[in-house]
Image (tube, helix red, strand yellow):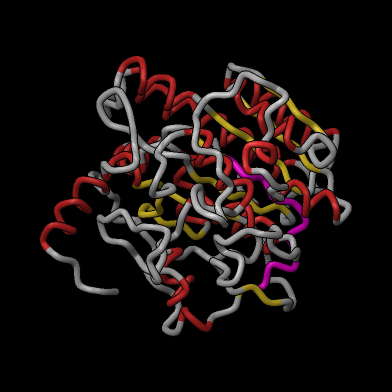
Amino acid sequence: MRRLSPAAVVALLLALAGCSSSTPANLFSDAASYSLSTDSIRFVVHISVDGLRQDAVTKWLDNLPAYRRLRTQGAFTLNARTAPTRGNTLPNHTSQLTGRVVAGPEGHGWAGNRYSNPAITIHSNKGSYVASVFDVAHENGLRTALFTSKSKFAVFANSYPEAIDAYVYKRDATELTTRFVDSLRTGTFGYAFLHLRNPDTAGHRFGWRLLTWHPYGKAIFNTDRQIARVLNAIDQDPALRGRTAVILTADHGGHRFNHGAEHPLDYTIPFYVWGPGIPAADLYDLAGDRRADPGGEQIPDSAAAQPIRNGEAANLALALLGLSPVPGSTIGASQPLLQLVSLPAADSTAQAGQSVP
């Protein structure tokens, strides 16, 4: 890992305030060449927690059993990045679902954060078709789902109507998660996306304050309960247990009453990967020289050495399922986040066998 400048150290301390000492040590002396077997994985659940500041999780980690479980049983980093040019919801979620940066010829082109005209799609906005994780999964015979707590996510339902098999919008996170968990029990989705809005909603209205009694703090605890329900549903279903991976990240963090692309508390986000064959390790250690820890800095898309970004989610999900990257994608396409191989799968009970209280 490269030595940080004093300015980068200061920014990192701001971004990683309250970081727990439970970060897993590097288990691999030669992580860049280490290959993981994920042959057991048949399903991927992709969760995005809107407005999740990573230091909120570390501050209350002992009282957040679901986040703690993802952190201690799977690979994670607290120093992932949003899209460098946009720090808001729709551009970053479009990156998560397409594996593309926002701007430029290879970008998905969706820079705005509002959506009201159903005639407009990601493709019409771009001027050409923008493939997604839904397309690849669906074309390979897997059922897909989009469960969201913001109505503007209809842009994805309208852009990929034939590739998304189930679309559910519920503003209330508890009700949405109930629908999501019920769907896992009654139908098998190869790839399912769940969006939880609570931290972002609380942050904009009341501020991103790390106090247990504060609405933002309460929102963090609420998302932990919803994530626990998803993990428990996986544990309790023999068809899913030991065969399901979970990817969890955020579109952005926040400070005061807003968020953008320039403040460390806004662009520094967590990224978790949990499931059979995924070791308890630091994601940057597993990625080796395929990703560069950014310290406390925001790194442009044009930089040769890229950090782990939330836009990794699409191609990581497909890689875990043994599928090819999203056509036209750039994040994690030629340089996958994890080096995956086809080997006899490891015993998955250590990762996916114990329920969250």
At 43% across and 28% down in the image, what residue appears? 221
At 41% across and 63% down in the image, what residue appears? 302
Residue 8: percent from left, percent from top? 18, 58
Q: How many marks?
A: 0
In the image, residue 16 sits, relative to residue 324, either above or below, namely: above
Residue 104: percent from left, percent from top? 50, 53
Please state, as top left, top right, bottom left or bottom right, where the N terminus lies in the image: bottom left
Q: Is residue 90 magenta?
A: no
Q: Residue furthest left?
A: 6
| Residue segment shown in magenta | 37-47
In the image, residue 264 sits, relative to residue 155, either above or below, namely: below
At 55% across and 55% down in the image, what residue appears? 105
Residue 59: percent from left, percent from top? 29, 39
- Residue 357 placement: quadrant: top right
User: Looking at the image, which is closer to me, 269 or 230?
Assistant: 269
Q: Is residue 276 visible?
A: yes
**30 displayed left or right of 152:** left
At 36% across and 57% down in the image, what residue appears? 300
User: Looking at the image, which is closer to me, 121 or 220?
Assistant: 121
User: Looking at the image, which is closer to me, 159 or 128?
Assistant: 128
Q: Is residue 273 visible?
A: no
**126 displayed left or right of 267:** right
Residue 215: percent from left, percent from top? 36, 18
Q: Residue furthest front?
A: 127
**70 displayed left or right of 119:** left
